[in-house]
Image (cartoon, rainbow, N blue to C red):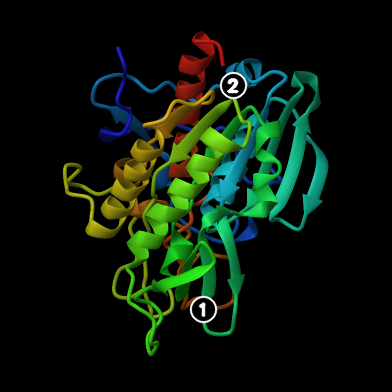
């Protein structure tokens, strides 16, 4: 039976230990290296996600590497895609040390696990579609997949796609090279007011449409749903904090509107694109609800920056609750490999 991983509870696992630490993994983004940056508690590492209808096994890096032998996997997205990429890299590097094939800063990286012939890459594409930054706004071409990945995607076997946070930036939207409006973050403009939700949905639809129907891609495309931030008493730039040390006590509490709506639009975009048959396979890793319940998993003030006023309540500590995404990824890969990826 199909197991719904998206609904469940975080269960305390007092003996639970992360697969890696900052002492055994060199790939942790400094700002997400919470223990090194002085975070005093470690209770946030002692919970496991238990879906309502089944068990989600611990992540097994050896099993994972055997499933993806000879394959190439690409992460596409923003800094949360990078957060996930580093979590996976840290877990896999406990079994085999990867070697770098290519790197452009920390944005675009390609590594290989030589004894498994497995290539793991990430490309920075925070809006998934073509865009240009001006002094006032982002000019976003919602119907044009970003060139940085569009030309490469067909050479991969597995692609994990995600994005979200950059759609809150002041933006002007274009379709067919024609202005259609601006989002609500761009005030004082004579352009029509178009909600950010329109931009988000259309960008996802364009990216998914391209991979599934235009790119000559015949592998497995995985959409990861929206992961929310947990700012309280303000936003990142207005004194917002996240000081929780445990998951949300009421685990049946409703997901707040913004992440819930963003997830809905991502799923809607994928449903519309999937009405046409594709050579590729498509799966969803739905983490919105599980991560909504983990306000304790962010770096907060422990970003390793002198400036303690700005908290990071968006990214996730490494190790931390985000490591569960690899368990979901492994679950999907096991199902797909059994049907021959």
Q: Which sits in the foreground, 112 or 232?
A: 112
Crowdedness near tag 2: few (<14), some (14–19) or many (≥20) residues, C-alpha within 10 Å: some
Q: Position of residue 202 (x, y in %)?
A: 41, 54
Name the residue: 44% across, 25% down.
Answer: 277
Q: Which sits in the foreground, 47 or 233?
A: 233
Name the residue: 43% across, 43% down.
Answer: 321
Is residue 332 rendered to the left or right of residue 289? right
Q: Where is residue 22 in the image (x, y as percent from the top left)?
A: 63, 46
Q: Where is residue 313 in the image (x, y as percent from the top left)?
A: 42, 62
Write down the residue under mark 1: 137
Q: Position of residue 205 (x, y in %)?
A: 43, 47
Residue 106 seen in this snapshot: yes
Is residue 278 rendered to the left or right of residue 250? right
**Label 1 – label 2 distance at C-alpha:** 42 Å
Vertical arrangement, residue 95 with respect to residue 259, above or below: above
Write down the residue under mark 2: 64
The C terminus lies in which quarter of the figure? top right
Name the residue: 49% across, 69% down.
Answer: 178
Vertical arrangement, residue 329 with respect to residue 310, above or below: above
Report the label total: 2
Is residue 222 rendered to the left or right of residue 233? right
The quadrant where residue 197 appears:
bottom left
Vertical arrangement, residue 111 with respect to residue 1, above or below: below
Residue 28 seen in this snapshot: no
């Amino acid at each position: 039976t199909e197991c719904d991983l998206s609904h469940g509870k975080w269960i305390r696992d007092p003996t639970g230990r992360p697969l890696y630490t900052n002492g055994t993994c060199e790939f942790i983004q400094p700002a997400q290296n919470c223990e090194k940056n002085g975070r005093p508690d470690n209770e946030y590492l002692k919970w496991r996600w238990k879906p309502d209808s089944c068990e989600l096994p611990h992540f097994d890096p050896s099993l994972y590497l055997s499933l993806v032998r000879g394959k190439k996997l690409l992460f596409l997205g923003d800094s949360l895609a990078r957060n996930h990429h580093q979590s996976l890299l840290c877990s896999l590097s406990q079994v085999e040390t990867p070697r770098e094939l290519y790197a452009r800063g920390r944005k675009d990286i390609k590594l290989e696990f030589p004894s498994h012939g497995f290539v793991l890459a990430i490309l920075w594409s925070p809006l998934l579609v073509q865009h240009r930054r001006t002094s006032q706004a982002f000019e976003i071409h919602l119907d044009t997949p970003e060139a940085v990945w569009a030309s490469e995607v067909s050479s991969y076997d597995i692609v994990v796609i995600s994005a979200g946070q950059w759609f809150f930036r002041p933006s002007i939207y274009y379709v067919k090279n024609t202005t259609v409006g601006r989002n609500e973050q761009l005030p004082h403009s004579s352009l029509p007011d178009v909600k950010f939700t329109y931009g988000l949905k259309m960008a996802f639809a364009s990216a998914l449409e391209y991979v599934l129907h235009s790119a000559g891609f015949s592998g497995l495309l995985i959409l990861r749903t929206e992961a929310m931030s947990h700012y309280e008493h303000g936003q990142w730039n207005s004194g917002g904090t996240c000081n929780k040390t445990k998951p949300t006590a009421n685990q049946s509490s409703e997901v707040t509107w913004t992440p819930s709506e963003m997830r809905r639009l991502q799923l809607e975009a994928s449903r519309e694109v999937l009405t046409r048959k594709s050579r590729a396979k498509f799966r969803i890793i739905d983490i919105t609800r599980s991560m909504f319940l983990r306000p304790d998993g962010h770096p907060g003030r422990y970003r390793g920056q002198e400036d303690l006023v700005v908290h990071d309540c968006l990214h996730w500590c490494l190790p931390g609750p985000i490591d569960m995404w690899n368990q979901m990824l492994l679950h999907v890969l096991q199902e797909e490999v059994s049907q021959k990826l």
